[in-house]
Each structure stands twice: as C-alpha cells, then as structure tokens.
Image: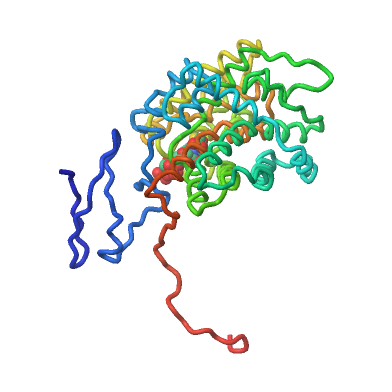
Amino acid sequence: MGTSATLTLGNHTLELPVIEGTVGPKVVDVRSLYATTGAFTYDPGFTSTASTASQITYIDGDAGVLLHRGYPIDQLAEQSTFMEVCYLLLNGDLPTADELAKFNYLITRHTMVHEQLMSFYSGFRRDAHPMAIMCGVVGALSAFYHDSTDIADPHQRVVASHRLIAKMPTIAAMAYKYAIGQPFLYPDNSLSYVGNFLRMTFGVPAEPYEVNPVIERALDRIFILHADHEQNASTSTVRLAGSSGANPFACIAAGIACLWGPAHGGANEEALKMLREIGRPERIPEYIARAKNKNDPFRLMGFGHRVYKNYDPRAKVMQQTAAEVLDELKLDNPIFDVARELERIALSDEYFIEKKLYPNVDFYSGIILSAIGFPTTMFTALFALARTVGWVAQWNEMIADPEQKIGRPRQLYTGPTQRDYVPLDQR
Ligand code: CMC
C-alpha cells in the first residue's frame, strides 16, 4: 500500500497520494486538490514541483550526481561519445556496435539543410547574435520538412528527431560563417559529428581542413556534458510548447529562445566575459566582494545552480578538459589561472560555502571554447546544438506519455477585482 499525505484546508481533509520514483524525492500527487478543495498550489519557479514523470535524466543536486538513463555523467564523458549518448537519451539503452553504426548513418544522412534555407541567413544583419539566427532558422525548418511535422505519427517523430540533431551543427556553423563573411561549407559526411562541425565552422573551401583529434574529443565531451539536464527552463519550455501539439521544429526553436537567457545557457558567454574583465588574480577579491554585496546586482557568472548545492559534476570534467585543450594548443592562458584561483577563493569563502555556491558547467566551458577559436557569441549556440538531443528526447517522451495533456499552469491573482468600465470622457 502506498503512503499518502494528509492536507487539511478549511472543512476539507484530503488524503493526497505520495508517489515514489525509482530514486529521488517522493512526490505528493496534488491533482485532486483543486477539484476537492477549490485551492491551487503556489510555487513560482517550480522549486517544489515535479512537472512530469521522466525516465531520462536523474539529478541529485545535494550529492552532485547526474545520471543519464542511469549512467553517471563522468563515465559517459570519459568513456563514451556524443553519438552514443544521443542514442542512449533517445532510446533508453546504450547501443550495440551495429546499432551505433546505423544511428551514425541515419544522423549523417540528414546533415544537409534545404538549399533555400540558406537564403534565410542573408535576411539577418551580419552582426546578429547567432542565437537570434538559430531561433529563426530552426523555427523555419517546420516550413521545409512537412513530412516530419505530424506528431501523431511515431515514424515522423523519429525522422524529425534525427533531422534536428543532424542539422543543428550545420545551422550553427552557418550562423558563424555568415557573421564573419565567409562562404558556407557543406557537410562532409566522412567526418565524425564533431569533426564535421569543426570543419564547417573553421574550414574554408580553398584549403583542406584537418581535424585535430584532441580538439575533436574535447568538443565531443563538451557536447556530452550539455546533452540533457532533466526539467530545466529550456527543456520545460520545449515540453510546454509541445504539449499544445506544436510541431517539433517550433518547439525546439522555443527551447533555443529560453536557453539564450543569461541565467541559463547564456551564462557561459557571461562567465568568460567576467573572467576577462577580472583579468588578473590580484583583482579577484574585488569581484568576490561585489558578488557578496546585496546592493550590487553583480553575480559570479558560472557559479551557483538551482539544483546543484554541491560541485556540479560537469564542472569537474570541464576543468580537466580545459587543461587538456590548453596543453594541446600550447596556450598559456592567464584567464584559466584566474578561473582556477577564483574557484579556490570562492570555495573557501564563508558566503559561498553557506549558500552552497559551486562552479557550474559554464564556469570552464568558455575557456575551452575560446581556446578552440569560437567567439563568445557562439558559446550559447554550441550549448543549443548539444542540448537539442535532450530537448528532442524529452519531447518524444512527453508525446508518447498517455498522461500527457496541454500544460496550463494556474495563478494566484493579485490584480483588481471586478469594476465597471468608465467611459473615456468620465476618466
Ligand atoms: N554569485 C553570487 N551570489 C549568488 C550567485 C552567484 N553566482 N548565485 C546565487 N547567489 C546568491 C543569491 O544572491 C541568493 O542570495 P540571498 O539568499 O542572500 O538572496 C542565493 O545565492 C540564492 O540564489 P537564487 O538566485 O535564489 O538561486 P536560484 O536557484 O534561483 O538561481 C542561478 C540559480 C543559476 C540562476 C544563480 O545561481 C545564478 O544567477 N548564477 C549565475 C548564472 C549562471 O552561472 N547560470 C548558469 C547555470 S548552469 C547552466 C544551465 O543549467 O543553464
């Protein structure tokens, strides 16, 4: 027999079922609350609300644990590839060698974009932020791939999922090429997913491009670390958009728009800007003091997380990857020294200890991406590229869920009560 929670509200006493997942906090099922008592729950920012059941990703923020389909993120980052993780997120289990080869083939087949889609880019200003371009172009995919927008057809959902994962590197690389005034490069499907993206971004038609395997591996790992993160803001946006039956391309465009914000995916761009602004280890105390000052809106970017109240497990792998990339490129990056020193000082400071603020995934990723050669404006676009598989997996899970219904939060109304309209000449 399951447990229940007893809630008393006015004359009503209600037994609310308590549901247990395979691991993690129990959940009080409040679905009958409104019908029985006429009351809503109030939880701005969803700090205590499970918006869905999911089998994809598990986070224990206090213990610093992140599992995809049960596998710890550090094992995946160290031992698997992004393509394997994509397969895992979409299908629930790690692929066999045959399954992986087939999946690679399917993704590779969809890397090109419709030729006409390219003309979209010239409608943007050259200095447009790549995320502005990504929102527009990804949303526009729904105007090109009509044969994969029927969400009631499981096959079309699979094709749309593969298309999105496959085309995102092409679309992101084109956003970069457009900004710097170089010609677009078509995908080269003899390369790996990441190798192909590197070539489309940094290659030019006039010369052969050689993929550096250390950089390829580092970027693959960054993609793994960003692939999914359960019901974060952008994923919840994708689910909410999809709950109305919107097509997958439109839903992912909505996710991209949400990810762009500086409190979410935009933080990697902001973190590097901040580290550059600090510039030298001697200036760190000044910034720590600002972060602690209640009257100063400044926050240490790349620090803190809604869910992790411990070291973000992704930040650990990211720090190690940063060291590897800087070593490979023989870069003595003073910003990396600033980052490590800032981390050391913050982690021994009472304010950060008490508030359980630790480096998050974005603290070191900017250092790696800029060492590889990406401008800061591309950082969030790379996050979007890698997160697409998570969004797609969560969207698929939602559509297939028999309990799925349109997302429609309620509210605590605090506006005026009913009043009569006053004609204009009497106001
Ligand atoms: N620097 C200084 N103080 C901070 C920071 C920070 N980075 N983050 C939180 N705090 C303080 C905050 O001022 C508050 O203090 P008080 O209790 O005295 O009012 C307390 O810690 C709790 O903060 P909160 O804003 O209520 O916590 P939250 O869970 O709503 O916010 C967050 C989480 C990620 C938005 C926030 O930590 C933040 O703004 N961090 C900087 C931006 C960042 O790095 N974002 C990337 C998140 S990881 C990538 C992703 O998943 O998208």
390 sits to left or right of 404:
right
Tell me: residue 60, above or below residue 148: above
Does any portion of residue 238 appear in the rendered image?
yes
* Number of marks in the rendered image: 0
Find the residue positioned furthest to the bottom: 426
In the foreground, 187 or 75: 187
Q: Kindly identify the residue that appears in the image at 29 percent across and 66 percent down.
A: 38
* Image quarter of the C terminus: bottom right
Residue 50 locus on image (x, y percent): 36, 46
Q: Kindly identify the residue that appears in the image at 59 percent across and 27 percent down.
A: 106
203 sits to left or right of 197:
right
Q: Kindly identify the residue that appears in the image at 76 percent across and 27 percent down.
A: 185
In the foreground, 212 or 416: 212
Place residue 211 in its image quadrant.
top right
335 sits to left or right of 343:
right
Find the residue positioned furthest to the right: 206
Residue 327 locus on image (x, y percent): 61, 11
In the foreground, 308 or 241: 241
Place residue 324 in its image quadrant.
top right
In the foreground, 130 or 348: 130
273 sits to left or right of 187:
left
Q: Kindly identify the residue that appears in the image at 78 percent across and 15 percent down.
A: 208
Does any portion of residue 261 appear in the rendered image?
no
Tell me: residue 364, above or below residue 7: above
* Image quarter of the N terminus: top left
Residue 191 locus on image (x, y percent): 66, 18
Residue 76 locus on image (x, y percent): 45, 20
